[in-house]
Image: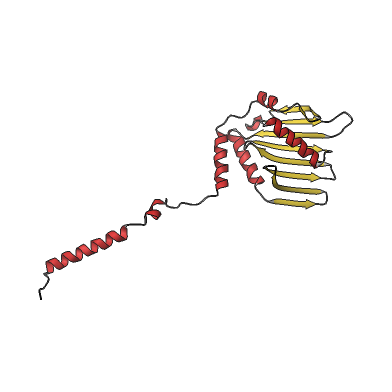
Amino acid sequence: MKRISPFFFCLLLLFSCGKGRKEVSNPNPIIASAPSGSIFTDTSEKSATQNSKGLEAQIPMSNDKLSDWIPQKVGEMEQRKLIIGHKQGMGMSGAIATYHGTEQDDKQISFEVLDGAGATGSVMLKSINQKLNLDYNEKMSSGYSRIYDREGIRVWEKLNTEEHLSEIEFVMDKRYHFIFKGHGIEMKELWAFVRQVRIEMS
């Protein structure tokens, strides 16, 4: 039987060790393609963040455009007061409009609209959206307060029967924050007003 020389034995051993190291150092290509420390984020949160960054770069609506945008009459209710620029000191664009019925009617509806464009507005809108994404429902002896989905939007609806107050809050077109307040108005009447405003201001 032939004996293997020590030289060839050492050479064979080195080759085998090198081959083993090569196979161990070759990682799984799927694992290698994933960035280190990568995390999975909620798609809705990512979308909200992207929308906020997009609004931050936009210019808030001017006072003249706000004035032209807000309707003079909604149904049978006419605009009696309009305040524009009340948030300019905070770097935001917004307005408050107040509507009344007939002279014999003491019903009143007002709404505030804030533009989510600009540095300050985009931060405000992101906070509002986070609030409206909550699941909230509170019943009280004088009414209720709840956040839920209605007519394609996320709304915060409040009713106080003792003070005859109703309120609806939502975000329109992923940019404009609205708060409607009704005095002496039933909730169904306030919703009818909201629908008309959404149509006229879309």
Q: Residue at x 80, y 38 (%)?
A: 189
Residue 184 lies, with reference to residue 97, above or below; the image says: below
Q: Identify which residue is drawn at 72% across, 38% down.
A: 179
Q: Which quarter of the rendering shows the C terminus? A: top right
Residue 89's spot in the image, x, y percent?
65, 30
- The residue most toward the left is 2
Instruction: Judge whether 60 appears above or below 129 on screen.
Output: above
Q: Nearer the viewer, residue 81 or 155?
A: 155
Instruction: Count the marks.
Output: 0
Q: Position of residue 180 (x, y in %)?
A: 74, 37
Question: Residue at the right extreme?
Answer: 104
The quarter of the displayed image where residue 182 is located: top right
Q: Quick check: 155 above or below 63?
A: below
* Position of residue 67 in the picture relative to residue 144 (left or right): left
Location of residue 138 in the rendering, given as x and y in whole percent from the top left corner: 75, 52
Query: What is the quadrant of the N terminus in the image?
Result: bottom left
**Is 118 on the left-hand or right-hand side of 77?**
left
116 left or right of 137?
A: left
Image quarter of residue 119? top right
Which quadrant of the structure image shows residue 100?
top right
Q: Residue at x 89, y 30 (%)?
A: 104
* Position in image of residue 172 (x %, y %): 66, 37
Please tell me which residue is depicted at 66% across the width and 45% down the height of the picture: 132
